[in-house]
Amino acid sequence: MCDGHFSCRYSISAFSQLQKMGIRHPRPAPFIGNVLLFQKGFWEGANQILKMYGPISGYYMGRRPMVLLSDPEAVKQVLQKDFSNFTNRLKMNLVTKPMSDSLLCLRDQQWKRVRSVLTPSFSAARMKEMCPLIHQGCDVLLSNLQTFADSGESCNVQRSYACYTMDIVASVAFGTNVDSQKDPDHPMVQNSKKFLELFTPLKPLVLLTLAFPSIMVPIARRLPNRNRDKINDFFRKIMKDMMDQRDQQPSGERRRDFLQLLLDARTTASNVSVEHFDIVNQADLAAPVKEEPRKETTKTLSEDEILGQAFIFLIAGYETTSSLLAFTTYLLATHPESQERLLREVDEFSENHDGADYNTVHHLPYMDLVISESLRMYPPAFRCVPVCGVMRITPLTTGAARVLFPSLLWSTQVWILLFLRRMHYKDQLMLATHTLFAREAAADCTVMGCKIPAGTVLEIPIGCMQNDPRYWEEPERFRPERFTAEEKQKRHPFLYLPFGAGPRSCIGMRLAILEAKITLYRILRKFRFETCPHTQIPLQVTAVSTLRPKDGVYVRVVAR
């Protein structure tokens, strides 16, 4: 009797926190909170909560309260105005080195130090040096698309773009040239995909960590992960060999890529202050870069920090960029009038410029509108980084439960077994353990009249905000003209956040947009896109880790 009473009390003991803040929320289930709301993906679950409980509402991810924030002025408060109180993202307890040394995971002063060193590496001048590498990747992509244009077969452009962005990441971040379409078994391609898979399939361990964090986090940290360690060792060796090779080369002969920018940052004394970190709002363009006397014995970035940033480049530069290109292609194929206007702009551009690069792509204004509208409708980083995903539950026995949870009461072990078996029957469950657009309050504060205690996580569902009919007229319609200067002046700037905002906004935004524009320009000079019998209308998407087409994007590639 006492045993059952304790288990019942523990299962709901954390579920009064949101109520004390004055935040409305759906009723949580014992132990797991509101996890089941997100079985079809976070976007749908968050939309449901916001519609039912308002622009500041909440839910429980396991025993942890999460506050959803969709009011643009409140979002501005968190991301920009009161940034000093919301510097950190949600802490990822189970992430290990070198991933834990990436900008995504770093916190407080360590994050400020690394971001300060890296911000000059993403300046406009540095982005110009990336253009030749992007064009090299485009040459391979165009060759692959030509095959479909010649055959007339429908093309899954999502797959073609995924191969292309994988090649770009391998080249720019790891200094390795590959053609993943023709050589999918290349060690770099295989290990990159295995690395990304580490952040999608989840094990029962994650669910149990949400329900019993104080018990499971120490256990999870001690469990061996040979697959992860093998992948880390592969990339460490690649990075070490490349560092040794580049260090032996004269500086003028070194390949100018993202990897070299990281290597240069090992001993550079250049840095900028936190008020100039906001690349999205171009605050860095006015940044005075401080140069201190060089000290050859002092390294500002460690080898693990360099590899951690390369890993982030792999996560952010692979799937999100390929999804942006795939979504944009789908929208052009299904809106031929917009595609015709863009084709005319591309033709006019080609008559007046030798090619597309960082200095000239701003002369493609309609392309900018198209990409912006694509990012509004289908923001790849809509809410989560790939540290969440689909989980397949394997049935556990009572013996396994006693081994895994020896300190838990017998009735609690039985409850866990029943729940896991129920989830196995349902087959799949989406869990999110870390959010890109989430911030943790460092001190007590007030947001929209609610008292937010220190340690609370506030989450910004940008996908929901960017498709909210209260702010966007007919949000389901593709209308690039929403992003003319006149139209942008009519709405709150914090309603459109595909790359975040404030000092912790996406540091790679310029490179992502540059890559998308050059790629689309190169493609549209040679081809146009048309729908085909395999084109899915409306397009089905999956909103698990990043937002991406669920079943691919099939179109007909037609030579011009």
Image (cartoon, grey):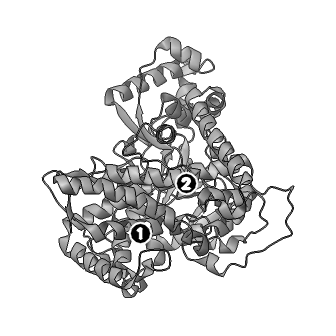
Residue 76 falls in image quadrant: bottom right
Q: Amino acid at mark 2?
A: Phe
Residue at the spot 50% in from the left edge and 61% down from the top edge: 133
Residue named by callout 1: 518
Q: CA distance from mark 1 to mark 2?
A: 19 Å
Residue 241 against residue 359 in the figure, above or below: above
Label 1 CA crowd tier, 10 Å (few <14, some 14–19, many 20+): many
User: Is 8 or 497 nearer to us in this picture?
Assistant: 497
Asked which secondary structure carries label 2, the reply is: helix
Q: Are marks 1 and 2 in contact (CB under 8 Å)?
A: no
Residue at the spot 63% in from the left edge and 35% down from the top edge: 233
Residue 472 against residue 533 in the figure, above or below: below
Q: Amino acid at mark 1?
A: Ile
Residue 394 falls in image quadrant: top left
Q: Quadrant of the N terminus?
A: top right
Instruction: Give the percent coordinates (x, y) of residue 490.
Output: 39, 85
Which badge, 1 or 2, is on the more N-terminal residue? 2
Instruction: Give the percent coordinates (x, y) of residue 482.
Output: 33, 79
Q: Quadrant of the C terminus?
A: bottom left
Instruction: Give the percent coordinates (x, y) of residue 32.
Output: 48, 36
Numbered label attached to residue 264: none
Residue at the spot 42% in from the left edge and 51% down from the top edge: 546
User: Is 414 or 297 nearer to us in this picture?
Assistant: 297
- In the picture, measured across the screen, residue 15 lies left or right of residue 97, that is left
User: Is 63 or 6 nearer to us in this picture?
Assistant: 63
Q: Is residue 52 visible?
A: no
- In the picture, measured across the screen, residue 386 lies left or right of residue 173, that is left
Label 2 CA crowd tier, 10 Å (few <14, some 14–19, many 20+): some
Instruction: Give the percent coordinates (x, y) of residue 279.
Output: 58, 72
Q: Residue furthest bottom?
A: 486
Residue at the spot 22% in from the left edge and 53% down from the top edge: 148
Numbered label attached to residue 313: 2
